[in-house]
Amino acid sequence: MTDAPTSVPAAAATTLVCLACDVPLEIGRVTASYLGQSFPVDLPRCPRCGFVWVSEEIASGKMLKVEQALEDK
Ligand SMILES: [Zn+2]
């Protein structure tokens, strides 16, 4: 069986796929929680299992900025 279960167009190189469900993630508004604070954020999420993909950039960048912003105010 050499055929992939799903055809992958060239554009899929930038498309994130849920490793558990093998379905493309969809950008959606989710509520992220960090240090006891909740805030809305647009992230790629799996429409099937609800997995939210959080990049290292967000985890180490934006989250940190949120933390700093909260501490400033
Ligand atoms: Zn999934």
Image (cartoon, grey):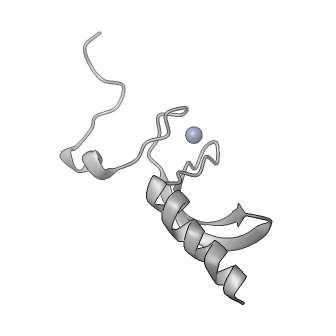
Assign the N terminus to one quadrant of the image: top left
Quarter of the view holding residue 67: bottom right
Residue 19: x and y in percent read 49, 33
Q: Residue furthest bottom?
A: 73
Taking the spot 28% from the left edge, 46% from the top edge, the residue there is: 12
**Which residue is located at x 76 percent, y 70 percent?**
37
Give the residue at the far left of this rendering.
Answer: 10
Q: Quadrant of ligand 1?
A: top right
Q: Position of residue 71 (x, y in %)?
A: 71, 81
x, y percent for residue 15: 35, 50
Residue at far top of view: 1
Residue placed at 68% from the left, 87% from the top?
A: 72
Q: Position of residue 38 (x, y in %)?
A: 74, 70
Q: Residue at x 23, y 51 (%)?
A: 11
Left-right relation of 16 to 43: left
Q: Residue furthest right?
A: 36
